[in-house]
Amino acid sequence: MHKRLAFIDTLRGIAVLAVLIQHVLEVIVQKHPTGAYYWVFHDAIGYYMNFGRFGVVLFFFVSGFVIPFSFPDSATPVRDFTISRFFRLYPAYWASIVIGLVTMYLADAMTYPSSQIIANVTMLQTFANIPNLWVFYWTLAIELLFYFSCTILFAMGLLNQRFTAVAIVIAAALVGIAAALLISNRTVSSVMEVGLNLSAMFLGKIIRDTVIGGKLRWPHVAACTLLYAIFAITLSERRFGGVYQENFFYSYSIGSAYVCAALVFVVFAAFGERMAWRPMAFVGVVSYSVYLMSPFVLVWVHRVLWVGDGPLGWAVFAAVVVALSVLVSWITYSLVEKPSISFGHRFRSQRRKPVVLEPVLSTQGAAE
């Protein structure tokens, strides 16, 4: 049994709380009179920094740090990797769908077409051009794309080659920057955004290869991070820029989210376990459940436990949502996630030989 990397769990905790705080503040701004605080809140989460996107991108970096090294040294590594990922992601995701459907029916009398529900059960709805049941499921499609990419590269013997990730990040950045500057098309921008998210993941692998693997050096990280940042800023300006409107997606907020996520991850990776913080690491352990369950906790708290407007009421609202989200997520982690992961291990083949993996890498998913 390998010891967990506490600083990675700490990053997961920071990431999921950033997403949660974004959602909480959006509810306050959109559904309650905030008076003189309106633009203070709005600018904080929509103009200068989109904390939700920051948290999601931080998860993507963690994914890149973890997933490429999750293929076991077994007789059937691709099969075992697929089984591991399936039992890591799907049971908790299915629980989220059930809780979400019940919540939205009881709270808002909302129902959904059976075809949409069935498609979402597969987690492949985005690839079939079928809407997500809830918008925050969009990140799971990116995760699956990264898993598929890693599997193909692993099968080709390229995944752990020294410069594979470097070449991918550089190529994606150059193509993405050129496309953003030369092609004014919404579809192209959307595709480039997928490329940017995958670049964050492969940049996470580059950082891992530098701080743990020893295959690369910090100049590689610096050069790739710089290109990634230019890609993020350019694409954000083209996709979300223009005249500022009262939404939460603007070039400054999205661009800064991508860049800040990279900088935070680099700092944490450079200092390693010295950056670990036990309470935040605990949140990181249950962060996949927090991501999946907290939107529905937010709905119930807003409906049942709203204590009033004003700074004190908003602070209480945020604190209750965070506390209950962590509590509910710990329960779903204990009852669904953890047993599912253990159950999935029964179907994995035996290792060819004992191997030493860094903590967390063989059992934890990037979606956490």
Image: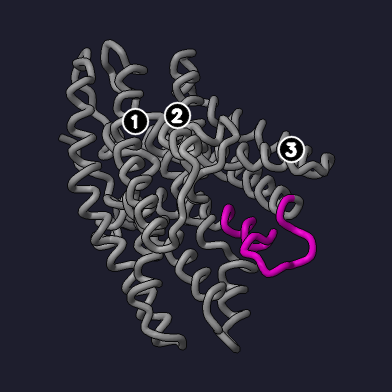
Q: What residue type is labelled 2?
A: Tyr
Residue 237 sits in quarter? bottom right
In the image shown, does 184 or 58 lie closer to the viewer? 184
Instruction: Name the element at disc 2.
Output: helix
Please give left or right for residue 362 compared with residue 228 in the image: left
Residue to which mark 2 is pinned: 147
Evaluate whether residue 85 shows in this view: yes
Residue to which mark 3 is pinned: 188
**CB within 8 Å, label 3 to label 1:** no
Badge 2: few (under 14), some or many (20 or more) residues near its Cα, within 10 Å? many
Measured as percent of width and height from the top left, residue 37 is found at: 57, 84
Q: How many marks?
A: 3
- Write the start and end of the magenta stretch as one range: 239-259
Badge 3: few (under 14), some or many (20 or more) residues near its Cα, within 10 Å? some
Residue at image location 30% in from the left, 20% down from the top: 80
Q: Is residue 249 magenta?
A: yes
Residue at image location 18% in from the left, 38% down from the top: 339
In the image shown, does 47 or 172 lie closer to the viewer? 47
Measured as percent of width and height from the top left, residue 13 is found at: 35, 57
Q: Which mark is residue 85?
A: 1
Residue at image location 20% in from the left, 26% down from the top: 345
Q: Considering the image in quadrants, where does the N terminus appear?
A: top left
Label 3 or label 1, whichever comes before in sequence order = 1
Label 2 or label 1, whichever comes before in sequence order = 1
Q: What residue type is labelled 1?
A: Arg
Label 2 or label 3, whichever comes before in sequence order = 2
